[in-house]
Image (cartoon, rainbow, N blue to C red):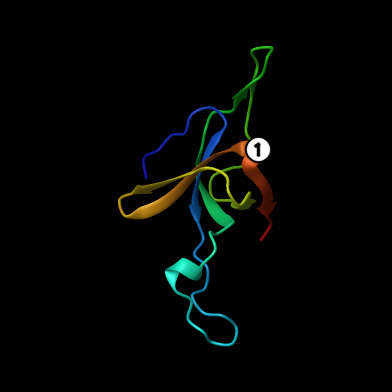
């Protein structure tokens, strides 16, 4: 992927949810919830503070993160779905 988000934006590839419940029922696409977990694919340069200083982002490429449910903008690039969101919408980094 050759994307470079601007400012404090982050590109995330959402992790697909299981298509079956614990009891084995297959869920149709319409019943699935939007994923809230994903892997960071690219990060911007950082946020520009009022003083003009550039504050680097806390998240890094390759990290697994949790993000707000209805945040960001979805894009499909080369048949892959990505989510573009601002760093404040990233809630946590999942330590593995």
Dot 1: what SS?
A: helix
- The residue lying at 53 percent from left, 59 percent from top is 34
- The residue lying at 60 percent from left, 83 percent from top is 22
Q: Which residue lies furthest to the bottom in this view?
A: 23
- For the image shown, how many numbered marks are present on the structure? 1
Relative to 52, residue 21 above or below: below
The residue beneath circle 1 is 88
Badge 1 crowding class, 10 Å Cα cut-off, few under 14, some 14 to 19, many 20 or more, is some
Q: Residue furthest front?
A: 30
Camera-nearest residue between 23 and 42: 23
Q: State the quadrant of the C terminus.
A: bottom right
Image coordinates for residue 16, horizontal then vertical, percent: 49, 64
Image coordinates for residue 38, horizontal then vertical, percent: 55, 55
Relative to 49, residue 78 above or below: below
Left or right: where does residue 58 sit relative to residue 26? right
Image coordinates for residue 1, horizontal then vertical, percent: 37, 45
Relative to 6, residue 25 above or below: below
- The residue lying at 52 percent from left, 73 percent from top is 18
Quarter of the view holding residue 37: bottom right
Quarter of the view holding residue 71: top right
Q: Residue furthest top?
A: 51
- The residue lying at 62 percent from left, 34 percent from top is 57
Quarter of the view holding residue 4: top left
Camera-nearest residue between 69 and 14: 69
């Amino acid at each position: 992927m050759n994307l470079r988000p601007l400012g404090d934006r982050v590109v995330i590839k959402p992790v697909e949810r299981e298509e079956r419940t614990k009891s084995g029922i297959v869920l149709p696409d319409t019943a699935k919830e939007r994923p809230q977990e994903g892997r960071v694919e690219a990060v911007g340069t950082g946020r520009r503070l009022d003083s003009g200083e550039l504050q680097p982002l806390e998240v890094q490429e390759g990290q697994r993160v949790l993000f707000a449910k209805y945040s960001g903008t979805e894009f499909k690039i080369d048949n892959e779905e990505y989510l573009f969101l601002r760093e404040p919408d990233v809630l946590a980094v999942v330590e593995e």
